[in-house]
Image (spheres, grey):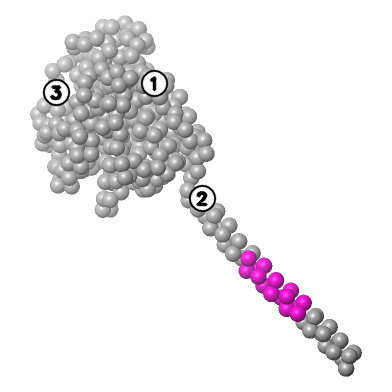
């Protein structure tokens, strides 16, 4: 019996050990598969969410914003935000400067934001570079502004930002005629009542915002190369105008805004293009969220070759001119007072576009 019960206990011990091994193996197998599932989930979210460990503010808006500074900032931003910001050059100015474009966002729907088509209004380039910088940072940190999530919006909509359409004109306005490639030619051009600090045209003395091929011949008050208002020898005669037309043609944009200075006002309708109720509602919302005024209906008999009207006519989309700031010749030290009423504009436009029907 003793021997029997001994061997029974031995058997039971062996059975218990076996069971233990089976249970332990089972548990660790479950553990392993749970761990594997977690790892899968993690790598999936990692590929969906871009991470930017070095995100930091790049643009200093409180200085006179030059073409050179813009290129430097653009390179830094593109390097800091791979997958979120893409830098391209969509053409060259008359003097061979780059026409820069920054694409910000991962969304399919596109919005075009342009600035500084008038040289002396380089404050618009400052503002647009600031928007790209701060919006990208907001995306990286998953922040919100005024109830708008940068990430939610920029994952649905991409902002196609061309901050400086007229770098040669910016150069003349900031540095005078001697900084131009041909100072004598620039000095020979008519001033139309301003100093060089008020230079709007490109280096050929053509006002690019009167050079677009829409009702181009409706304005012919100035017929010689000038600091402002000259429409050019023919519609779309200028390399900058041609490059912008190509950019518009190659972008399936849902909305466009062209930034100028000054007036705290938007131009969004004319008596040439059909204005829908949908566009009326968009303009209403933008005015309400920025506090900007309404320029009213532009008369097709008086406007000529403007970018925004051209964009409206050729795309059928909502297109506007936005006049930043409450006075002319903005002092960059005063950047916040001019920029902050308008800071939300890209988010409001993205929110509108994200909600539009196909
Ligand atoms: Zn302007």
The image quarter in which residue 125 lies? top left
Closer to the chain start, of discs 3 and 2, is 2
Residue at (69, 74) in percent of width and height: 23
Quadrant of res 205: top left
Q: Residue at label 2?
A: 47
Which element carries disc 3, helix, strand or loop?
loop
Name the N-terminal-most of marks 1 and 2: 2
**Vertical order, 211 against 81 (above or below):** above
- Label the magenta part by its dominant secondary structure: helix
Q: Residue 67: which numbered mark, if any?
A: 1
Q: Is residue 266 left or right of residue 143?
A: left
Eye-nearest disc, 3 or 1? 1
Say whether residue 221 is left or right of residue 289. left
Residue 343, percent from left and from top: 30, 34
Q: Which residues are magenta?
A: 16-31
Residue 10 rendering spot, x and y as whole percentages = 84, 83
Rate crowding at label 2 as few (under 14), some (14 to 19) or many (20 or more) other CA atoms within 10 Å: few
Nearer the N terminus, badge 3 or badge 1?
Answer: 1
Q: Is 268 in the magenta?
A: no
Marker disc for residue 219:
3
- Quarter holding the N terminus is bottom right
Q: Which mark is residue 8?
A: none
Q: Residue at x 35, y 33 (%)?
A: 131
| Residue at the image point whose x is 14% and y is 31% from the top | 295
């Amino acid at each position: 019996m003793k021997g029997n019960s001994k061997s029974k206990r031995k058997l039971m011990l062996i059975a218990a050990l076996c069971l233990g091994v089976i249970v332990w193996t089972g548990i660790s197998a479950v553990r392993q598969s749970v761990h594997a599932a977690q790892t899968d989930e993690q790598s999936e979210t990692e590929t969906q969410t871009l991470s930017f460990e070095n995100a930091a503010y790049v643009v200093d808006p409180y200085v006179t914003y030059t073409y050179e500074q813009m290129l430097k900032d653009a390179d830094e931003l593109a390097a800091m935000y791979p997958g979120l910001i893409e830098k391209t050059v969509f053409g060259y100015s008359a003097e061979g400067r780059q026409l820069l474009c920054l694409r910000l966002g991962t969304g399919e729907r596109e919005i075009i934001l342009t600035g500084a088509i008038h040289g002396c209004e380089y404050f618009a380039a400052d503002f647009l570079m600031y928007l790209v910088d701060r919006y990208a940072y907001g995306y990286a940190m998953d922040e919100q502004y005024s109830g708008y999530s940068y990430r939610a919006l920029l994952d649905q909509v991409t902002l196609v930002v061309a901050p400086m359409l007229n770098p040669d004109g910016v150069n003349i306005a900031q540095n005078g005629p001697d900084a131009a490639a041909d100072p004598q030619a620039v000095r020979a051009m008519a001033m139309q009542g301003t100093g060089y600090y008020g230079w709007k045209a490109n280096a050929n003395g053509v006002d690019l915002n009167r050079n677009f091929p829409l009702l181009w011949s409706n304005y012919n008050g100035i017929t010689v190369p000038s600091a402002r208002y000259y429409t050019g020898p023919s519609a779309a005669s200028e390399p900058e105008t041609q490059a912008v037309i190509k950019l518009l043609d190659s972008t399936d944009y849902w909305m466009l805004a062209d930034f100028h200075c000054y007036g705290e006002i938007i131009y969004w309708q004319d008596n040439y293009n059909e204005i829908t109720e949908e566009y009326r509602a968009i303009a209403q919302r933008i005015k309400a969220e920025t506090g900007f005024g309404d320029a009213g209906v532009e008369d097709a008999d008086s406007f000529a070759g403007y970018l925004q009207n051209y964009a409206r006519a050729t795309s059928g989309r909502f297109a506007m001119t936005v006049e930043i700031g409450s006075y002319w010749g903005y002092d960059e030290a005063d950047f916040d007072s001019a920029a902050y009423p308008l800071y939300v504009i890209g988010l409001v436009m993205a929110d509108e576009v994200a909600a539009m029907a196909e």
